[in-house]
Amino acid sequence: AAAPSGHGASPGPTVPAQRGEAGPVLAWLREAVVSAALRAAARPRRAVWRTPLPAVLGLRLFPRAGGVDELALDTALATVTPQVRAAFALRVLEGLGPRSAAPVLAAAGVASPEEALHAAEHLRSIVGAEAEALLHGTEFDPCVVQARPTDLLRRRRRTRLTALVAAALVLSATAGTLVALRPEPPEPTPPVTALAAASARATDPRFLVRTPPERWSDTARVDLTQWPARGERTGDTALLSRALDAWTRGTGGGAGVRVSFTPSTPTTPPAAPPRLLFAGSVDGSAVVLLHDGERLIRYAESLAGRGGQVLELARADDADVTTGAAVAVARTGLGTRFLLAPWIDESAVRDLLRPDVPAAPLPVSGGGLTDPVPQPAADCGRVPALQVRSSTRIVEDHSFLLTDLGELSPAHLTWTPAPGTGAPARQPREATSAAGLAAWARSACTLPGLRGTGVRAVNRWEFARQALPEQAGPATWTCTRADLWNGRGRVTVAWEGPDPRGRPVRVPGATPEDTAACSRFGQHLLAGTYWTAPSGARYYLAAGSRALTGVTADGPVTASVRGQFLAVRTDATGPVRLTGTMPGSGGLPGWGEPDTESGGS
């Protein structure tokens, strides 16, 4: 049969390719089932002849009994309205997105589909990912029941009593009619479940977690969990309540809250009371910083009552002494104010493009709030960075660089110098030395391209230094790796000439979205590019990391050399296929090729 259409036509039934793809029959049947279920739920529960299960003479029918998980899910579903249960079924069982589920709910008579979907998503975050598997089980299958025969002796007694019951019903017909006409008593308020109580506790400012002020100086875990609550409004219950409410409403699409989040950041409401890091008035806004163990949450509202509520979420599940050392509190035309970790003793601002200029001291309030740090110039004429030093009280007395990439947590900058003659493989180190600052001065202008991508740390690795032909000086081959909070890595390979004022030249080739290259799990790299000497002669150059014992070029340029460097004079153009040789392993393809397995040294 064909599903009815809005124009009276009956298109032939089509079966969708996969669950969630709407076809005429499936869409019509889905709306019919949801409408029938909501109509049934709207009937009075004490309606005459209404039975919850099929009735078979001589048999007792009842659903299968589930375990503890099924009982908890059934209890959670019983605490919400039928409209929310319908939205929950469409999202979990049918796999529909919010945009596809809303029209189905509206067609079924739900007055506010968006509110029902928001409540269903909240319920989904509470019951967990196993909800779908439980709902597909036999305990929730309406077509599966258990059957047992009734008690024979009881059946005989019921037969004898049937006549007496019938007579009693006739005599009490009038009284029964009057009773039936009495107004339906109000529905009893469902009992508060453990899940509902936990959700209410998570959004109650009275239960916010507050770390003691000096806990950070005597702990083996130095991260955001050791931040004390700071700011002059940590006792402002009304402000904290608005922040928690905006978190709950905003992540569910609530009106009046502007929400932004870094890639791969969960946007679910709080499942447990979060930790309060800061609450205060900064640059014309009331700001609240929260931490739930995995995410940083920044709430802001204008003190003048304009602009609505702003909510920012960012991942922070791997923060440590460096990546948990500062959090952006407010951004204005003057720059960004940061709240520094309690273990930061010294702070300064420096321009990465000017490594020879000393860092300027950065004033910090008694509560750890800095003066505004300037933003990078649009033309890359200035790339500010924070240079901070940790306290000796945590035995981590060292300075490191942080740069603002437009997110709540600034990115940690490190540097891996080029391999020296006979020196062991080098590891990433802090870029605050003269050599590290000079190295980052050449790569600093690549940092603005990483804004808003969820970057945790950036390491510049100089994997090779090559003597250029015609005694033109040394060239430096670099691999800059941006580690993201979600565990992925973005890599850029570049070539730098002997002029220290020159900008890096990116090595052409496909760049993978996620790679282990230039990390501890990808410690070998080979790259090549064309270069024109000051004399006008054209060369093809290639260089590999320290473990390579040979380089082979095929294509427009054909050559093979021992060692890790190749330089061939050529007038050819076009991509060259490179292969590196390493002891005890197969060939290493050049950077940018589809099957590359490159990395850092």
Image: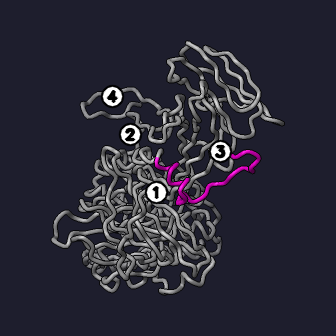
Query: In the structure shown, which secondary structural element does the residue marked by tag 2 occupy?
Result: helix
Residue that mark 1 sits on: 265
Mark 3 or mark 4, whichever is nearer to me: 3
Q: Quadrant of residue 220?
A: bottom right
State the residue in front, 9 or 235.
Answer: 235
Q: Which residues are magenta?
A: 419-441
Q: Give amino acid for label 4.
A: Ser
First in sequence, mark 3 or 2: give its number. 2
Residue 107 placement (x, y as % from top left):
29, 47
- Image side of residue 250 versus residue 575, left or right: left
Question: How many numbered discs sit on the rendered protein?
Answer: 4
Residue that mark 2 sits on: 27
Q: Residue at x 63, y 68 (%)?
A: 67
Q: Residue at x 23, y 62 (%)?
A: 256
Q: Residue at x 25, y 65 (%)?
A: 309
Q: CA distance from mark 1 to mark 2?
A: 33 Å
State the residue in front, 186 or 577.
Answer: 577
Q: Give amino acid for label 3.
A: Gly
Residue that mark 3 sits on: 600
Q: Residue at x 67, y 44 (%)?
A: 522
Query: In the structure shown, which secondary structural element does the residue marked by tag 3 occupy?
Result: loop
Q: Quadrant of the N terminus?
A: top left
First in sequence, mark 1 or 2: give its number. 2
- Callout 3 crowding tier (Cα within 10 Å): few <14, some 14–19, many ≥20: many
Mark 1 or mark 4, whichever is nearer to me: 1
Mark 1 or mark 2, whichever is nearer to me: 1
